[in-house]
Image (cartoon, rainbow, N blue to C red):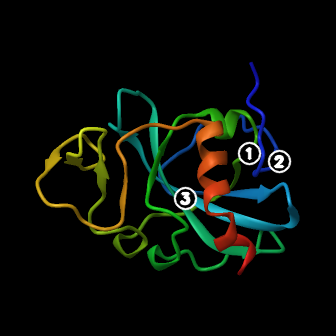
Amino acid sequence: MKTKLENIATIKKSEVLPNVGDIFSFKLISDSERHFFGRVISVDAKLGWGEEVMLIYLYKKYSLDVKNIPLLQTSDLLVPPIGVNLTPWKSGVFEFVKNSDLNPSDMLEKHCFVSFNGRYYDEYGNRMYEPIEPIGYFSIVGVGGVDRIIGENIGLLTAS
């Protein structure tokens, strides 16, 4: 059954699997002019129970031209890092723009996720005893989860 999307628009289905450093765009259903951006940070994260988990960042920054990518900084994250499966690319809501080497300054120093039991872990499932902001969820989401997360934060995108 196809997931009904309420916030993010379908752009173009990807034939290419995501790689570390990939910059991708996404659009809002309510705003077809602006291209928002995300970045693949890892393709081998161990969040939740999944395999092929991509650790991604979603940014508040946008451009009217998908080829004119704004400076993507961790200070401009829309939400904490997210673990996603391949469905956002396969369904066409994330469109590959370009690959660019990841530098240490492009990433948070540490990634922290909270599990359902209140424990903290890094993106590889290693236990952390102290939380480090920003804190994501120790789970995997698909296209429906990404749509929900963007919907919960849409005010941050439409206000910019």
Q: Quadrant of residue 58?
A: bottom right
What amino acid does circle 2 point to? Ile
* Viewer-nearest residue: 148 or 141: 148
* Viewer-nearest residue: 157 or 63: 157
What amino acid does circle 3 point to? Arg
Percent position (x, y) of residue 144?
65, 37
Q: Is residue 152 left or right of residue 115?
A: right
**Label 2 packing within 10 angstroms: few (<14), some (14-19), many (20+):** some
Q: Earlier in the sequence, mark 3 or mark 2?
A: 2
Q: Nearer the viewer, mark 3 or mark 1?
A: 1
In contact (CB < 8 Å): disc 1 and disc 2: yes
Which residue appears at 35% of the width and 38% of the height? 47
Residue bearing the label numbered 3: 39
Percent position (x, y) of residue 85?
53, 34
Percent position (x, y) of residue 82?
46, 50
Q: Earlier in the sequence, mark 3 or mark 1?
A: 3
Q: CA distance from mark 1 to mark 2?
A: 5 Å
Residue bearing the label numbered 2: 11
Kind of element beneath mark 2: loop
Q: CA distance from mark 3 to mark 1?
A: 14 Å
Residue 16 visible (yes or no): no
Q: Quadrant of residue 45?
A: top left
Query: Where's the C terminus, which quadrant?
Result: bottom right
What amino acid does circle 1 point to? Val
Mark linked to residue 144: none
Percent position (x, y) of residue 30?
86, 60
Mark linked to residue 93: 1
